[in-house]
Amino acid sequence: MASSLEHELSTSRMETVQPGTGFGVLVVEDDEDQLLLTAAQLQKLGFEVSACIDGESAKDILGREKFHAIVCDFGLPGDSGGDILVHVRRHHSDLAFVMLTGHDDVARAVESMRNGADEYLLKPVPPRELATKILDAIEKHELASRAAKKSEFERMVQGMSGMVTSLEVKDRYTLHHSRKVERLAIAIAEQLPDLSDQAKMYIRIGARLHDVGKIATPLTILHKEGPLNDEEWIVIKEHPLHGERITRFLPREVQKIVRFEHERWDGKGYTEGLAEEQIPLGSRLVMIADTYDAICSDRPYRDAMSKDEAVRIIRDGSGTQFDPNLVPVFEKVVNALDHPHE
């Protein structure tokens, strides 16, 4: 019977499907005529439909294929629609679930909604109403999923920012360094007309976390008063690699900013010796902001230099250390900011 249903649905799809939502829907209904009718109606409205007649088949299909929603009759043989609902919420929690029933049972409706059904509808349901309910349920789950991902993303960034802060508070020379680099970097990014809001967000985060890999660097090296020897420089140059590993759960664009922030325009930087536009834009931009704040800050081996001296040094490095296209933008921005290194 399953192969017969698949054949009829396949034939129906070829004859009736029109451009539409393209969302995948699994219809579970033990009345074969009703199943074919519901599937055909949804296909005409643009859904990609699969179908089966019992709960065991539904579980098997859900384990093999991805769907946006399931439309399930409550009164199935064997596993009921309520059993399928429990299974879906346990194993496919982001799947929209529309329960159909032929009996107006308030207690059953309440139980279904409590167990996670998005809709509980009394048959027969007009096709367009059913389609609207499915789309509303899918949208609800997609919004919830995006909110959850955003919340998790923000928690990870906050945690990594805390690592940077804990590192900086141990050293009066770098206190608030990452926040100042972030401020200047995003001010430069705002002047680049082709950058999307998402790209600017990645630059903001990359700037804030550019030194997070130094958490793996011994404090004796970070706080050394005087020039580093060759062995210590080797250790210092590993911090972008550590930073990339620490940020591995963040978007790749952020990882690249952290990994390649010490590359130079002329190819003489580290860790890979990338040159010019091989270096991610965010890394080129953050390097300028990082260098500027470092020059304008006290260090164990020298006093802070003036804003004008810092701008001159970066201008002199245009085309060698720094992207010559970004240096004029930096100068414009830094002259407009009030005390950007404070």
Image (spheres, grey):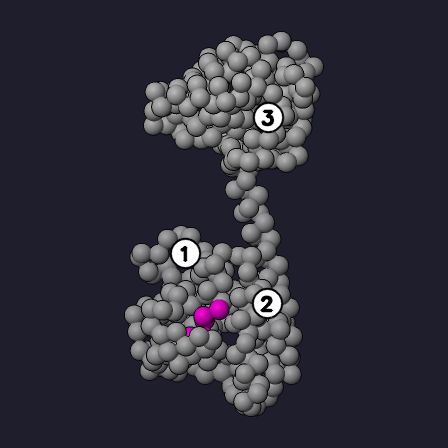
Foreground: 42 or 293?
A: 42
From the top left corner, tell me how far across and down residue 209 is, in percent.
53, 65
Mark 3 → mark 2, Cα distance in angstroms: 52 Å
- The magenta-colored residue range is 259-263
Element on which disc 2 rests: helix
Residue 132 can be seen, yes or no: no
Residue depicted at x 37% and y 27%: 20
Does the segment drawn in magenta span residue 120?
Answer: no
Residue depicted at x 52% and y 72%: 240
Mark 3 → mark 1, Cα distance in angstroms: 45 Å
The circle drawn on residue 189 is none
Residue type at mark 2 is: Val
From the top left corner, tell me how far across and down residue 270 is, in percent.
45, 77
Say if mark 1 contacts mark 2, CB within 8 Å.
no
> Toward which corner of the image does residue 191 lie, by quadrant?
bottom left
From the top left corner, tell me how far across and down residue 128 is, in percent.
43, 17
The circle drawn on residue 164 is 2
Element on which disc 3 rests: helix
Residue type at mark 1 is: Ala
From the top left corner, tell me how far across and down residue 181 is, in percent.
48, 68
Instruction: Assess disc 2: are there few (<14), some (14-19) or many (≥20) residues with their C-alpha within 10 Å of its C-alpha.
Output: many
Quickly name the residue at label 1.
Answer: 199
Mark 1 → mark 2, Cα distance in angstroms: 22 Å
The circle drawn on residue 57 is 3
Residue type at mark 3 is: Ser
